Image (tube, rainbow, N blue to C red):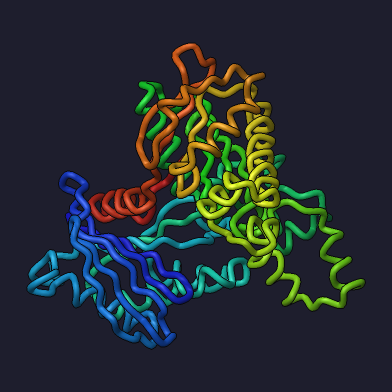
């Protein structure tokens, strides 16, 4: 079975084409600047990179270009589109309606439209991508895999906010959590690496990228996670503020005269590491370089970033009454030995010890804790596309409506 995995952003389409016989990635790429001048598609086959400069007016046009590239005689990987057996779509928000991956039909599409208000920046392009594929490949089954689904196992004591209960009952205001496919993949993979039973295993997974979140996974289920009603809550991120006193929002509006839109933009796009470094950068590589060169404000930003991660790990160790492993993943988690080392320095009280030499790598799957560490510490490169492809394969092959996670 060959599966096309699609991840649609507001102005981009990220894709992978995977042969599930051996789970081999045949090609992958990114169509970017959709609806903007200067559009292009970057297509990769093995180690070869092909760039096609072309403006794309919408997601349908972008996905048509992707399909054309897949069957291109020179840079394609299949002879005919009939070789695409199914399409798996990353969908950011499934709310409480979706606690599993599902075969997409009219009922599912209606539910996705109803959830748009919960993720107004993310779900609309996800929906556009699904509709485009349905039009371009009308006979091919589509499966939706939700960022929020893995966290639907959280208990009420973890996901409810201390707000009037009717706000949850009527408007479903609660913690949802995100990066679910990543937390799901790396938590299971960590158990495999350590030779542990996934359903008798306590692991804290740290997805540290431009967007960042931490999850407490006990016995194969997410019991808490740092992102909340939106991806804004939790850790300090590239441009997102993470946890703040909510009264700050009111202060910005009342005392500084900021509109709702300006406050939203400030908290999501101008805060985090970008804001803390006085707009130096939101990229951790730039910030680490600056800090190591003596830039004090860059160093302070790094200290805050690391401190917040360590606080969440400590809290989740308590929430699970112990922890067997801690996993670092995503762009920063996989590629910053400095961040990993500094976070683990806070965790000596848990018996965490890492080997600096083993830790001094980027993007490599390995155990970095010492043999006498009471908690295993690992780097596990995330593979969300593979999770989406596996779920899609299962649903299509078994002719079921959904793949239940719990």
Q: Position of residue 371 (x, y in %)?
A: 44, 13
Residue 347 drawn above or below residue 312? above
- Residue at horizontal 64 percent and vertical 60 percent from the top: 274
Front one among 142 and 61: 61
Q: Is residue 275 visible?
A: yes
Residue 152 drawn above or below residue 65? above
Give residue 118's quadrant in the image. Answer: bottom right
Q: Position of residue 132 (x, y in %)?
A: 34, 78
- Residue at horizontal 44 percent and vertical 30 percent from the top: 359
97 with respect to 156 (left or right): left
Q: Position of residue 148 (x, y in %)?
A: 53, 53
Front one among 362 and 215: 362
Q: Position of residue 208 (x, y in %)?
A: 53, 46
Front one among 146 and 349: 349
Location of the N terminus by quadrant is: bottom left
- Residue at horizontal 69 percent and vertical 62 percent from the top: 278
40 with respect to 266 (left or right): left
312 with respect to 221 (left or right): right
Residue 276 drawn above or below residue 11? above
- Residue at horizontal 67 percent and vertical 30 percent from the top: 314
Q: Is residue 85 visible?
A: no
């Amino acid at each position: 079975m060959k599966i096309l995995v699609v991840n649609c952003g507001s102005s981009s389409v990220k894709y992978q084409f995977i042969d599930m016989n051996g789970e081999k990635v045949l090609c992958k790429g990114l169509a970017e600047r959709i609806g903007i001048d200067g559009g292009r598609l970057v297509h990769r086959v093995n180690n070869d990179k092909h760039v096609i400069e072309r403006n794309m007016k919408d997601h349908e046009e972008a996905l048509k270009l992707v399909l054309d590239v897949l069957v291109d005689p020179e840079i394609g990987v299949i002879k005919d589109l009939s070789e695409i057996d199914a399409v798996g779509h990353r969908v950011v928000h499934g709310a409480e309606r979706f606690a599993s991956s599902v075969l997409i039909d009219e009922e599912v599409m209606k539910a996705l439209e109803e959830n748009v208000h919960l993720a107004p920046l993310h779900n609309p392009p996800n929906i556009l991508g699904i509709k485009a594929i349905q039009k371009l490949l009308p006979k091919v089954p589509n499966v939706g895999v939700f960022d929020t689904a893995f966290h639907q196992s959280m208990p009420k004591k973890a996901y409810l906010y201390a707000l009037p209960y009717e706000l949850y009952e009527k408007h479903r205001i609660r913690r949802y959590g995100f990066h679910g496919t990543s937390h799901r993949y790396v938590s299971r993979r960590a158990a495999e690496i350590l030779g542990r039973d996934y359903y008798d295993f306590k692991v804290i997974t740290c997805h540290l990228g431009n967007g960042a979140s931490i999850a407490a996974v006990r016995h194969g289920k997410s019991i808490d996670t740092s992102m909340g009603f939106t991806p804004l809550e939790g850790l300090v991120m590239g441009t997102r503020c993470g946890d703040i006193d909510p009264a700050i929002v009111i202060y910005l509006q009342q005392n500084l005269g900021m509109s709702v839109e300006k406050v939203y933009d400030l908290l999501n796009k101008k805060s985090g590491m970008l804001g803390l470094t006085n707009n130096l950068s939101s990229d951790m590589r730039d910030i680490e370089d600056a800090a190591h060169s003596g830039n004090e404000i860059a160093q302070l930003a790094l200290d805050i970033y690391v401190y917040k991660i360590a606080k969440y790990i400590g809290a989740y160790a308590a929430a699970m009454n112990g922890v067997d492993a801690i996993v670092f993943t995503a762009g920063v988690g996989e590629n910053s030995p400095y961040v990993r080392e500094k976070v683990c320095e806070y965790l000596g009280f848990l018996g965490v010890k890492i080997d600096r030499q083993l830790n001094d790598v980027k993007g490599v799957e390995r155990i970095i804790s010492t043999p006498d560490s009471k908690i295993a510490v690992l780097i596990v490169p995330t593979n969300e596309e593979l999770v989406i492809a596996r779920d899609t394969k299962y649903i299509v092959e078994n002719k079921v409506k959904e793949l239940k996670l719990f």
